[in-house]
Image (tube, coloured by chain):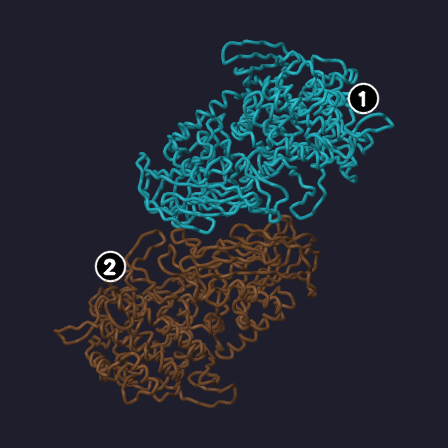
Chain colours: A brown, B cyan
Amino acid sequence: MIRNFSPKLFAQLSASDWLYVEDIWDPQTSLAHESLFTLCSGKMSSRAAHIEGQARPSLPAHYMHRLFDRSEALQRELVNMPDWSKLSIYSRRQPISPQTATVLSEYIRVLDLKQGFLAKHYIFEDAGGCRTELEIQKLLSRAYPNGGAIRVRIKPLNYSGLLEFENLIDATVTNFIDYPRFRVKHYEVREIRSLDGDGVAVDACTRDFQEAFSTQTAIRVSDEAGNELVLHRQYRPYGEVACEFFDLYVEEGKAYVIDKFAAVVAAHDGGDCRARATACLHNLITLGFDQLLEENRRIYAQFWERCEISIEGDKRSELALRLSLFHLMSTPNPHDSKSNIGAKLLHGEEYGGHAFWDTELFILPFYTLCFPEMAKRLLEYRYELLPAAIRYAAASDCVGARYPWESADTGDEECPLDTIAWDGTSEPCVVGVQELHVTADVVYGAYQYYRFTEDMDYYQHAFGEILFQTSRFWASRLEYDEATDSYGLSHIMGPDEWHEDIRDSVYTLELIRWQLKLALKYFREADLSPVQQALVVRLGISTEEVQDWALLAERIRPPHLNADGVIEEFAGYFELHDAVIEEFNEKGMPIFPQALRDYPREQTSIIKQADVLMWQYLFDEYFSMESKRSNFDYYQKRTLHGSSLSPSIHCIMGLRSGRPEEAYENFLRSALIDIEDKHRNTREGLHAAAAGGSWQCLVMGFAGLHLGADGRFHFSAQLPSSWQSLRFRLYHAGRLIEVHVEGDSVTLYCDAETPVHYVDSGHSKVSSPWYERPVAEFGGE
Amino acid sequence: MIRNFSPKLFAQLSASDWLYVEDIWDPQTSLAHESLFTLCSGKMSSRAAHIEGQARPSLPAHYMHRLFDRSEALQRELVNMPDWSKLSIYSRRQPISPQTATVLSEYIRVLDLKQGFLAKHYIFEDAGGCRTELEIQKLLSRAYPNGGAIRVRIKPLNYSGLLEFENLIDATVTNFIDYPRFRVKHYEVREIRSLDGDGVAVDACTRDFQEAFSTQTAIRVSDEAGNELVLHRQYRPYGEVACEFFDLYVEEGKAYVIDKFAAVVAAHDGGDCRARATACLHNLITLGFDQLLEENRRIYAQFWERCEISIEGDKRSELALRLSLFHLMSTPNPHDSKSNIGAKLLHGEEYGGHAFWDTELFILPFYTLCFPEMAKRLLEYRYELLPAAIRYAAASDCVGARYPWESADTGDEECPLDTIAWDGTSEPCVVGVQELHVTADVVYGAYQYYRFTEDMDYYQHAFGEILFQTSRFWASRLEYDEATDSYGLSHIMGPDEWHEDIRDSVYTLELIRWQLKLALKYFREADLSPVQQALVVRLGISTEEVQDWALLAERIRPPHLNADGVIEEFAGYFELHDAVIEEFNEKGMPIFPQALRDYPREQTSIIKQADVLMWQYLFDEYFSMESKRSNFDYYQKRTLHGSSLSPSIHCIMGLRSGRPEEAYENFLRSALIDIEDKHRNTREGLHAAAAGGSWQCLVMGFAGLHLGADGRFHFSAQLPSSWQSLRFRLYHAGRLIEVHVEGDSVTLYCDAETPVHYVDSGHSKVSSPWYERPVAEFGGE
């Protein structure tokens, strides 16, 4: 499968189960591959548009954390920055690319997940029969996360002659290139310039906030022995395209190496971004491609040491998970608490790079258990933006803090009030207004982080303030009903976005109930540490206010169950037109029942994702096996998985309901979502929540990890029948833990030594049905 | 053949023998069609890239007379200005264009030569089967030569829905788009802006001289009944692309009309170019598309009244000639004496838009005899640039005035000292240094203009000064040889550019001889008019100096003849390796003889074009039929027609040598050069000299017009055997003359009335061999 590469590169490549491969150039799948092969340095990303340019379709994009702009768009979105990756190559005036080849042979593109580089090989034949072998490596540097490097090894196979090159920074790129209605350019070019005859630069700034950034690039060329070749370079300012033209006389059968280095620095990096980009570029050149690769290898090895997974018996899922984890580990900035992770990572333009509840509930557990320092940054982000959340609550006629449904750099609500389709049809969009649960999700995620890591620093400072302000928000937002003397919420929406403007979303209310009770516990005077006491004083928190919240929590309306113990997703859900899903499309995704086709979706019981299962997942220990099974069986048949967040939860809850086959089916829906482009939108970026959710399937699902009330890790494993074993790693309390699962047997190795802890397998330890438990217990962990 | 257009447009179209048609969209020929369908207003041009964009390959270009820039290029060249013609149209996000159609049917594109507009029709089917009918008309306004207009009539055939549009000015365009080595952007964008929400503008300036220009565009949309539709327009600045986005809900079966207007004004137009462009745009909108078309129709009718031609029996040649004349009449600015006509007109980027001797010897006769006011502007251009020619002579260590081989706006020599091929190989280029004859060609062309028009104003002022300064140049440049007591020139080149660095080019020396003798006559004291006397005083011309020139002319070395009376092109030509052409390629063009393939071209007798025949053409009356035939027969077999200037002269001299078949063959080589893309470079622009040369074939060749020493027009017609008749028009001394030729009979109609003048046909009146005539007679017309 892996073929054609030069001996040097071939020797560099990891074993094939670490290689994600594209072995044919196909315009139909090229946009999805641009997402799948995106590289990220933790600071910035580069989609995998072919650096030679020319191949179409293409959505070249380069994003940087924290660099957002609105301009004509409906929301602040990640700025598609100047494309520094372009290096045009011409064979007798004909642009070399996979698409322009008369004959394209031996094409292969490989993402080395273990080492964090992309490699490509093909042979290009021009219209005159000249055959040129190309091998291109690309990396985004972990050593210098403002830098990237590309190595082109080029060899004329049957001719000697002149090749022409353009080292480019293309600052004409826009967002939404192929959506004319949405196309927008989020930056202004201030200057295009030559770097004193050795490289080119584009200085630009975002349009709204005028944040400056500088993109700089230079090349080095050598023969295969490594002797640098002196070139005549000509600087060419093509408007907003900075170009450095050079040519190279190449001899038949000899290979030549062109190394392109690029640095991108924004004002938020501190200092003069022009000078800092120049310094970074200099560092990259000094270190050189081989050493940058070596550094990446070293750092990615450290990353994988923390989170390596393997699945004996399901190599495709293993590769899919490794690919997901590669992107998850690559994306966040471990040194920046002002950025988060967008729903499509930093890999595509959908959702504008905004953080959703996806962060706290889907991807945070992975970081918490493998990269707690990254998890902390993500949570600090919420704390940084607490002032914006306080403003948002006030603007919603409430007090306290309300987190936005979509969060960018300012923390303002980025979810627009209208959805405009590509064809211009506009519909009111209420998810930002109604999907209140995100505020409780933030608290839940942060609390889980604390429970797993026992990070008292975060818990006592940031978490306390968030908990206080968001609880205050809920207290002001809950609606009192005199007739029943109870609290509920109307005109809201749960995670199931196909039922808008509903009342008493059980998921939302139960999370609020939990958090209000948690607040009571957190702020119980007797237990307050000195740090917490200082917080209480600073925020002017009164014992009475917190106690009022607990009283209020007790009067939140309880869920409604039917005779089978099925929990009603929201008030009135059981009265909707009902039918079950019986058909599936060619990608294995459920199809809306024919029986309901005459009804608008919102008038049916068909849901996008199952709020009830999500709730049960988060508070598993309060539900009996019977309750979980009833609810799983009921909702599984009514869930269309219109959200990429849905299948992973169905996998885990399927396992916990004794439905292993459905569980595995849903695991595959989640794990393969992007490599099989199941939602037909991988072109817009990768599904971060599905990546994190799939990891949770392995760890919380198949291995059955849960954190007991005793603060210890418990496992109750059940592998898919085709899996011989599952292994994964965790990083907990400064120690590496390797978990080996075979059948239902779990063995833990600590710091790669002998087993230190053995846990009997077995299912949920709590057997009493949840609804028999006193309400007070919900928040009582 | 003409089909599919809407009834309204169909009714507008001229008869089919006035329509140049492209009836299939073919990427292989699209670049040539971009040249062939170029429109020109006299001030500016617009190549026929499909305005919808997307179609590839494409070399969109918009040029303006006098707007040159050098920057990184090797010479000052026409600036490819921002593309104002673009109007992107999207059917469900899919760009509509001939290339992007799933099904493309009924495609036709027509240039209406009589009325000066381009019309196109096709039906576009998108990937979902939605069929949209498009009809697009384009014109460059003769009423407002800074303006252009495009009308798009669009009709959804099988759907109702939303179409999306982008009214664009694309200021990312460069020169030499598909030549990476030469690609250069000749302007800087200063501002992209909205025109107060109704249209967009790009303000830019050339890079070297910072000449400002402004491009502005706006659209109007109406239903088919002409009711204007109100649109929501959104301004979008995409870097150097100014965009105005709008959409339109279209109903199945109904047609909608989008009119795009654009104005381009440069600083050299006078006043504030931004304000003037806005005013022009306003005028265009006020007049409206229909009226602009009507104005073009009126003005092109006046043009054609002056120069209409028809050929019974050869409709293909007739159409080719009409196409050539359309472009010749469209191109020059009748109000500007600071611009000339490039070798590729204003229709493409080859030769940078520079004027060559092509102007005076190939295209000037057409203007002189049909549009003398335009001819005068072209000659005034040389007079305007006489100071630069004086500088050039001084820089060449001479005195007087030397015209540059390639002339742009400054009059400096634009011919580079090195030719760089697309692949970077560089060769010294001596044509600019050595092809001195251009200076005599200017004088010859100007003198012919005077003889035909009797324009005493030009003759007494500008011509006198040019004649004086250029003669002074020759006197200082000619090299004296003591051994033979004669003058000659070494290290020069004649029109045949395949023999460089030669000595005593007969063409060059004989033109010099002629002009020096003409100077003697011109400045003969006794004949000087008061105006001329003033000139003599102003320039300090001494009788002695002029008489010295005449003496010098008599000592210029005479040509060398062989035993057959064949004149040797230059000293030593007869000693070169000799063979004759025997093979022709599939386009009917001669192939270099196999027998000579081991010799470098310059060591053979094979020539690019025949200097001797050219000389005989210009001074026909001094050669006997035998001399012409000997020389024709000799050089015809050795001429590869590597220059597009060559075949027309071979046609005319073939006729004058009694070689009618070869004459017709060469006529077709000239007339069809672009429509058959004989030189495979029509993509780079049209061959202006071939266009003018083909017209000379008709008028000086087949009709045999020559101006007698008596100042009267003489005809000696001989039509190709397949032609029943030839008709053409001349405009002479304020009167329209229509010439009808049938066989060898010529009838003249003056001002479209009854015949006024009848001329017996008959061949050259001068039968004595040229070399028997005293040298003195050469200048003695």
Q: Marks 1/2: CA distance?
A: 100 Å
Location of residue A477 in the rendering, given as x and y in whole percent from the top left corner: 23, 71
Provide the chain ID for the residue under circle 2: A
At label 2, which amino acid type do we have?
A: Tyr
Quarter of the image for residue B542 reads top right
Quarter of the image for residue A196 reads bottom right
Residue A693 lies left or right of residue A244; in this view the side is left
Q: Name the disc covering residue A666, or none.
A: none
Q: Is residue B731 above or below residue A179?
A: above
Q: Are marks 1 and 2 on the same chain?
A: no
Q: Which residue is situated farthest in the right direction here?
A: B483
Give the crowd class for mark 2: few <14, some 14-19, many >=20 residues within 10 Å. few
Foreground residue among A514 and A413: A413
Foreground residue among B276 and B534: B534
> Quadrant of the image for the C terminus of chain B?
top right
Foreground residue among A338 and B221: A338
Q: Secondary structure at mark 2?
A: loop
Q: Is residue A716 visible?
A: no
Provide the chain ID for the residue under circle 1: B
Location of residue A722 in the rendering, given as x and y in whole percent from the top left corner: 45, 76
**Count of marks overlaid on the render:** 2
At label 1, which amino acid type do we have?
A: Asp
Residue A635 lies left or right of residue A660; in this view the side is left
Q: Secondary structure at mark 1?
A: loop
Task: Identify the residue position indicated by label 2 in the image.
Answer: A599
Task: Identify the residue position indicated by label 1 in the image.
Answer: B564
Q: Is residue A241 above or below residue B540?
A: below
Give the residue drawn at x 69%, y 12%: B765
Location of residue B526 in the rendering, given as x and y in whole percent from the top left corner: 69, 13
Question: Closer to us: mark 1 or mark 2?
Answer: 1
Quarter of the image for residue B167 reads top left
